[in-house]
Image (cartoon, helix red, strand yellow):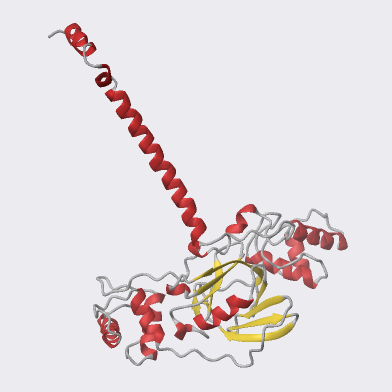
Amino acid sequence: MTGRDWTMLKDKRPRWRQSLPLVGATICTLFLLAVFWWCVWTASAGIDSLMDIYVPPAGSGLMAAEDESKMGRLEHAQCESDRLLYLADPLMEGEDVAELQRGLKCLNLYGGAISGRFDRLTMAAVQGLQRQKGLSHDGVVGPMTWQALANDFPVPVIEGAQPVPDGEREIVIDVSRRLLTIHIEGKEYQKFPVAVGMAKTPSPIGEFRIAHKSMNWGGGFGSRWLGLNVPWGIYGIHGTNKPWSIGTMASGGCIRMFNRHVEQVFRIIPEGTIVRMVGRSPGGVARQLEQGSSGQDVVALQFALREQGCDCGLADGRYGEQTAEAVKQLQKAYGLMADGIGWPDVYLLLGVRQ
């Protein structure tokens, strides 16, 4: 059969059969479009349902940059994420293994050294805990094992709690004393023990705000999360499944609390509350700073400017317009070119040059 004969034969097919390929292609296209838009809608709905982004009221001045509405969001935090721990070759190592060994030792289940290495002795201690708690004694440490380890630790009762008065709230966290204090209308209301960042992952120093609140994420984040608007990382005040660490330098920079305590704080502290992190030096400044800069060194500059009587607002690690104006004020006072940029001569005058 020639090509011409085949063409004539096709043309004799019923019209509905001739249109089948076009109909099939149209249906496939519509189906793919429907799947695409369903995925987009599901993703956006999932984000909204997981946690509401806190957007400050217009003119509040809490967060200047548009993307700062996402600061302090729990899903971006890394410091308290729990990996699965088990006996492997080579042996698993890390601070999380050392944390596990400390908890097991507190319950007299582990008699070895705090080595940070998940060896056979550590696995045997984990299996002993799992047997006690009626869990599968496979020696693998996941969420249920962490929680079983945490459940036996007593939570200290906080004395002197009075009915919560009306008034402006503020939190002060002293990282050197591992102590969180709530102030209401300038008066001390309640104190709580906390865990802070390790030496290699220190908690930030400065004046920040509660940017976001979330509930019941569990695991290393415990039952409540209050995210801080620190501009150089994701930090927050949260609960923990490692209560034996409270009172120590143990976290990746976040502030850990007993779950029962963080639930009390969560109830009475609204978004936008100032959190003052104190207790150690913010360090010095080694680089040029200007509008748009951020970091712990900006906090050091802001504290020093304030001591010189130059108003830069909160020492929040953001080199914004108000900080630039404070630098200009200092420069004018000493006869320097008032460009609002942090240069070495400014650092020398303030005593913050590294």
> Quick check: 70 above or below 223?
above
> What percent of the width, then of the height, locates residue 187?
74, 84
In the image as oriented, which residue stretches furthest toward the left?
1
- Residue located at (63% from left, 89% from top): 161
Q: Is residue 287 visible?
A: yes
Q: Quadrant of residue 328?
A: bottom right
User: Which sits in the foreground, 148 or 318?
Assistant: 148
> Quick check: 76 above or below 240?
above
Look at the image and tell me in which quarter the N terminus lies.
top left
> Quick check: 184 above or below 4?
below
Lateral position of residue 83 relative to residue 157, left or right = left
> What percent of the width, then of the height, locates residue 275?
66, 73
- Residue located at (54% from left, 63% from top): 73
Lateral position of residue 272 relative to residue 255, left or right = right
> What percent of the width, then of the height, locates residue 339?
79, 53
Look at the image and tell me in which quarter the C terminus lies.
bottom right
Lateral position of residue 84 relative to residue 266, left or right = left
Q: Is residue 351 visible?
A: no
> Quick check: 46 above or below 14?
below
Q: Quadrant of residue 212?
A: bottom right
Lateral position of residue 81 relative to residue 191, left or right = left
- Residue located at (30% from left, 29% from top): 24
